[in-house]
Structures are given as C-alpha cells and as structure tokens.
Amino acid sequence: MSNPSILKLYQDKFKEIVPPMKPEAARVEADRCLYCYDAPCVTACPTHIDVPRFIKQLASGNPTGSGKTILEANALGHSCARVCPVEVLCEGACVYHDWQEKPISIAALQRHATDHIHKSASFPFKPAPDNGMKVAVIGAGPSGLSAATYLRRMGYPVTIFEKRKLPGGLNTFGVAEYKMDQRTSLEEVKMLFRLGAGVVMGQEIGKDIKPEELLSEFDAIFVGIGLGQTHALRVPGEDLKGVWDALSFIQCVKARDLKPLGKSAVTVVIGAGNTAIDAVTQSKRTGAAKVVMAYRRGEADMRAYDFEYDLAKKDGAEFLWNAAPVRILGKKKVEAVEFQRTVSPKSKFKVPCDRVIKAIGQSKHFSLAKSFGLALSEDGRIKVDPATLKTSHAKIFAGGDAINGGKEVVNAAADGKRAAWGIHQTLQPGTPAPSGSEYWVSTIDGRKVAPIPPRGTHG
Ligand code: SF4
C-alpha cells in the first residue's frame, strides 16, 4: 500500500476497534478472574479453551504458558481473540453478569497472550514423527487450518489445497478490517504452517485436480470449503454497474484495492446479518456519504448481533425495515432501488443511490460435495457424524460452514479439531492419544472425542 492517502484512510478509519491491552492492565484484569470451578466461560467456548487456566497463567506472569494453553485448545486462538462474538460466548457466560458487574475481558486477555506468542515467533508445538498416513485438507480457511494443525501434531503428513492465492479463508478475505487486518490473519497462518503442512495454492479441486486423484493418493480427506457466492436478489437490474456482492466488496477493502469501488454518495446494503453490517460500516469508512441498510423484515427479526447493529448505528447508517427490493433502476449504472413494503399498505417507493451491496447469505458448494458423492441435507449442507465429523464417505470428513451453513470462525476451529481426532480414530483405531492432547480431547460416555460445540452449533 504505497498511496499515502489510502494509508491515512486506513489509519484513521480502520484502526482496530479493540486496542491491545498494556501489560499492567492485563495483569490487573487477570487478577479480577475468580478462576471458577466448572467455569461457564469454558463451556460457552466452542473450542473449550481453559479460560481460568490461561488467565491464571497471565496473572502469575507467564504469558508464554498462557498462550500455549489457548493454542492447545484452539489453533486459531490468535484470530479468535479479535473476531469472536465474545458477548454471546465466553464473556456472555462470565459469572460477573450474575452480580450485574462487567465480565472479565477474556478476548482482550486472550489477545494479550497470543500476541506474546506471535511476537516471540516461537510456536509452542511441534509435529509428531511422520506416521506415513497422508491426509488432504481442502480449503485453507479456519476449519482446514485447524484440522491441519492437530493432524500435524499427531504426525500425519498433510497437504492443504487452496484455490485462492492467499490462505486464511474468511479471516483473510471476509472479516471487517477494523476487527482484524489481513496481516494478522496471514501472520497466524504462517505460524501454523511451521508445523510442516504442504500447501498447494491456486488449485481448485474438481477443476484443476480431480477428486478421484485425491481419493487414491490420500488415506483421508478433510473438506473445509466454506460457502460459495452471495445469493442473487433475482430482481431486474442486478447486473448493472455499481451492484456488488458483499464478500467481493469487503475483499476489495481488505486488499486496500479501493479503485474498483469508486465514490458513493448513497450506498444501499440489502440484508440484515453480520455480513450486511460489515458492508455498511466498511462503506461508511471508505467514504460513502450515506448508507442505507434495507431489510424485508422488521428490526426485531434482524440476524446481526446487537453489538454489530450498534456499531452500524454509531457509524451513522440509516435503516429501512419491512422493505423488499423489486428492481434496481439505472441506464448504464445503478441510479435507484425500487422497494415494496412487506407490510400493509404494500406500496412501492424508490431510494436513489449509486451503489447496491447484496448481503443476503451465501450459497453452498453443491458441486464439489456431489463430485465426492457426499450425502447432503435438504438445504445443501454436508451431512456428518457429529462425534467424528465423518461424512457419508468412509474416507472423507468435513467441517466449518460447509456443514453448519455459516457460523463463527471459532465454530470452524472447533470442527477442524474434532475432525482431526475423528480422522485419527478412523485411521488408527485404539491408538493412545498423543501427549498433550488431554487438554483438547475430552471423554464422552467413555469415548474420546474432541470437545463438542454447544447445542445447536450444527443445526
Ligand atoms: Fe473467570 Fe468469568 Fe470464567 Fe469465572 S466465568 S473463570 S470469573 S472469566
């Protein structure tokens, strides 16, 4: 990024919402923790990080041990400290809420500890000796990276196949820049790659590499392919210049590639999930004078978290409830969106604008799943055994958005861990757990499984 005005814009508008904690502040905050027995914050974390343990290690001046505790349970603990919706996970479950007091700032402390590990540039884990059983990981997003990390630690030679030119998946391309920049995501990936996974970038399975080749070459395959394109609105005018899908828009912002975005006096964002909010706030921060978020249902039905909604309000966004787009108007480029009210009277009206961003969810990667012959749910998610994440194919496991339809990075990280354990149990049934895995493998009904995310995670 050499353009000084773009550099200034990013420094001013995209500085991280939550700044790093100073060491003294971290020590004081860590001292507030009650180190609860059966801590609810641990249960609320899909990867079951031992929160009281890592906080106690911080309080006793051991940030290296603290970071290790975090990364033991969650290979993506560095990015999760920035992007997790902690208000509804660990911090939301903290016992301090019972006394109407501020919960422990778990995410900030987690970040403090993992920043320390990354600054010292010494990843605290090593791979076990190669066991010769090869595993292919399709997708270098959060679930694939997590699976590859735990598999390498158990000695499996792993090759990751990624169709993009950079690894990290949504962490690199889709997370709002003020939550985590691209550099941090890539820094985390670099650290994980030190465990020695092979990486094949820019190659798509099903297009550049045949699925049969993987099946014959590898002993197991993990599918962590996330979701596909943003859904189409299916209204006239959708192909006009100035109509964006939210992920492409956010990708340009994250890559500092602002030229294709152009200037906008009025941007209309269609949708009301967390991605829609990201599109709203990033539009405002890249200079759109006015941003209107439109949703076909009411405010109470919006899917975005409350804190995300608050952020959009703080950024000065306007909201249009109970309004469905019926067409996008313009000669060569977008000039307005025509809406119809979804409540009585069902009148039509126009909102003049020069940019439209679609954020109404993403499609599933049906074709790759079908090319492996995997069983799918009615809505296109890959069906898995919840304990091992094994699909309908004996050699193939899956995790992340491809099985849950689109959840958090931490859910994908938990899936990668559980699938790694499922692969290990399938390829080497009955072998003892590797040393250190007592922290990331729990026993349920006498059967060892990687921690199961909270109820409902897999729909
Ligand atoms: Fe500490 Fe709160 Fe977790 Fe208890 S619930 S261990 S006080 S962070």
Image (tube, helix red, strand yellow):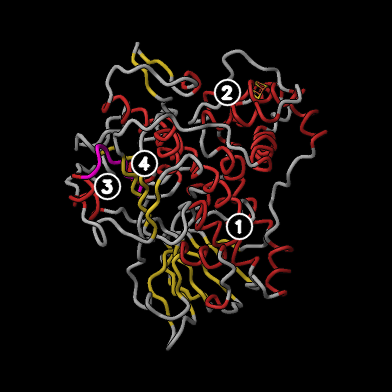
Q: Which residue is mark 4?
A: 158
- The answer to whether residue 221 is magenta is yes
Give the foreground label among 4 and 3: 4
Q: Which residue is mark 3?
A: 379
Residue lying farthest bottom? Answer: 331
Q: Which residue is at 69% across, 23% downward?
A: 57
At label 1, which amino acid type do we have? Glu
Q: Which residue is mark 1?
A: 177
User: 126 above or below 307?
Assistant: above
The residues tagged by marks 1 and 4 sit, at their Cα atoms, a distance apart of 30 Å
Mark 1 and mark 2 lie on one chain; the one further toward the N terminus is 2
For residue 50, the mark is 2
The residues tagged by marks 2 and 4 sit, at their Cα atoms, a distance apart of 27 Å
- The location of residue 265, given as percent across then percent down, is 61, 78
Give the foreground label among 2 and 4: 4
Give the foreground label among 1 and 4: 4
Mark 2 and mark 4 lie on one chain; the one further toward the N terminus is 2
Where's the N terminus, which quadrant?
A: bottom right
Write the start and end of the magenta stretch as one range.
Answer: 217-225
Residue 352 can be seen, yes or no: no
**SS class of the residue under badge 4?**
strand
**SS class of the residue under badge 3?**
loop
At label 2, which amino acid type do we have? Asp
- The location of residue 90, given as percent across then percent down, is 58, 30
Tell me, yes or no, whether the two marked residues, 2 and 3, touch with CB atoms within 8 Å.
Answer: no
- The answer to whether residue 181 is magenta is no
Crowding at label 2, few (<14), some or many (≥20) Cα neighbours within 10 Å?
Answer: many
Residue lying farthest right? Answer: 24
Residue 64 can be seen, yes or no: yes
Q: Quadrant of residue 430?
A: top left
